Amino acid sequence: MKKTVTIVFFALLQAAAAYASGLTELNVTPSPDSSKVAFTRGGDLWIREIGGSGKETRLTFDGSAVILNGYASWVYYEEIFGRPSRYRAFWWSPDSRKIAFYRFDNAEVPVFPIYSPFSQRGGLNLTRYPKAGERNPSVRIGIADLDGGNTVWAGFSDSPEQYFGTPFWSDASDELFVSREPRRQSLLELFAVSASDGSLRSVYREEYPTWVTWIEGMIFTDKGLYMARNFESGWEQIYFLGFDGSLRRLTDGENWDINLIKADKKSKCLWFTAKRDSRIHQALYRLDAKGRITALTDPSYNVAAVKISDDCTSFEAKVSNARTPWTAVSGNPVRDRGPAAVNAAKPEGKYPVPEIVTIGNDGFTLYGLISTPDGFDPAKKYPVVMQLYGGPGTPYVRDRWLDRDSQDRWCWENGIIYIVVDPRSSGENGRAGMDQAFRHMTVKETEDYLAWAEWLKSLPYVDGSRIGVKGFSFGGTTTAMLVLGHPESFCCGIAGGGVYDWILYDSHYTERFMDTPQANPDGYSEASVLRWAENSPLRASAGLHNGSPALRLTHGTGDDNVHFQNTLQLADALQKAGILFELMIYPDGMHGYRGYQHEHDAASESLFWTQHLLADK
């Protein structure tokens, strides 16, 4: 450990010296044997020896403002590799003798400007950002041999009408496994790329009528990998995929949100967490060699921080739900045949107590968490704040202790019922629910939120004329739709950072669910909040509620994900329609407000609810 720390520290000193010289190094990454580091500089991929001479070797030579070797184009960073990658698009081989990298050609990708107001003249960040239907970056996949200095290129075309997933190396460092999807993301293929000549070997193929997801969270063995996929049964199942292309399905049942934890080579057992016995609780399970699945934690709680012993005979974890603080549990799955006992301490102090509720709509079960305010009196009528999101496969009903979105202390302290709800497409209904969003994103979800509003109105202690709604990002989209399209159900709302016309969002995410605007113009039109503003019932009343605008929009001007452009276009559409609204701008704010901007947003939100839900109480 001490040696590794020393090597990394020395590498950081070298990187700092290069940066001070004006040569910025990005994503400095040590090789597995700690003899070298790889990094990108000026659009090219480099390596440097650690210690000794510190000799540098340049592996690519065509880097520029539009050619990026080992550094991701924005849409890959955001939607495929993920933000934790910090744009890194190169991967060391296990033997430290090769580096695989993606080469991005952004020359034909449209530029989007993001303006910063700070300094005397301001600033402009120009991002190569492909919006729905626009040209994607072209990608080539290279494997650099550090011994011979040569780079071989994988035998894929460089057509922009395809995507490549995050690759992984074979243990022997002789093959790189690369997944590929066409632009219409209904097919996934996995190829083994020869590190010696770039030739392709087909390993796996998966098709689904709507869309497929990338293979992630695998557990590797010397013969293949365990993976969770949802293409076959309508739910997620665990499979073993051999490197020779053989495929075995290991589970059945209504599983969702599977997270593979550990595989025991000796006993042939697999540990995983999943929503299996509950649609909103992820428990720990053990799959044995005979295909038997045992729940190791209580499925009425959500599990986290799972640790499996080295000999795979015991585990430790933490569990909680919205009514029970995080509690340590442990067990021996060989000896214990049931879930570990939960001996939870009584919560200290007073908190909101969210309870699980369900309703049915159109044959689907919808889940929610509802909290009544402090001093609740069922003989009184209370206003409601509904929190939502709505994106496919993204549940917001998270039954965990003090979850950020599942309870709201301000509402609890100020006499407002708070409820978090999900639509059919969030995941609790498996693929059958998610697939309802395909080519008509937000349409069926809106129907489900209206069903929630009608259910709330049926409760004797709810003031049905005072139901507010709020959401951020996809939730901001949905919130604006509900307030503009259905003011009879939602009297007011706060929409933050929303996509208000899907042609304004990135290609990979949007087209996964909606196809391209060229192929699905009607779907884009019915899902556009700008169109909802044109036809809103609020036009007749000038958007007034108790003399004040009923819709509040917020957005950060520096948002590189959902551009501020969305809110500006919605503001224009509302003005044309004569609908009054509030607008809060956060200069240079990103996708999710931080620091003083977050504090300001929370304080102004409280004032909004006071004005619209508590006035004349």
Image (cartoon, rainbow, N blue to C red):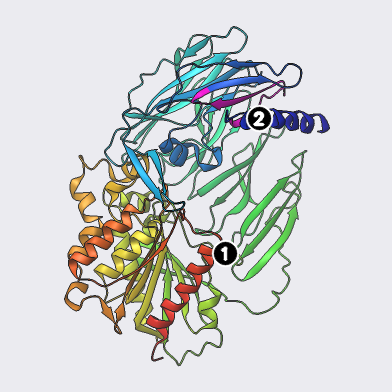
Query: At 39% across and 39% down in the image, what residue appears?
Result: 127
Query: At 27% across and 41% down in the image, what residue appears?
Result: 515
Task: Note whether residue 19 is visible.
Answer: yes
Closer mark to the observer between disc 2 and disc 1: 2
In the depicted structure, whether residue 319 falls above or below residue 32 = below
Q: Which mark is residue 52?
A: none
Q: Which residue occupies the extreme right position in the image? A: 2
Q: Nearer the viewer, residue 125 or 460?
A: 125
Q: Nearer the viewer, residue 247 or 384?
A: 384
User: Which residue range is magenta in the image?
Assistant: 25-44
Measured from the top left, where is residue 110 in percent x and y?
A: 31, 36
Measured from the top left, where is residue 395 in percent x and y?
A: 46, 57
Instruction: Give, as a three-letter code, the residue at label 1.
Output: Asp
Q: Which residue is mark 2?
A: 15
Measured from the top left, where is residue 231 in percent x and y?
A: 41, 39
Within the image, what quadrant is residue 374 found in? bottom right
Query: Can you say which quadrant of the picture contains the N terminus?
Result: top right
Query: At 37% across and 77% down in the image, what residue appears?
Result: 467
C-alpha gap between disc 2 and disc 1: 39 Å
Please, what secondary structure does the residue beneath circle 2 have?
Answer: helix
Q: Which residue occupies the extreme front position in the image? A: 120
Q: Which residue is mark 1?
A: 403
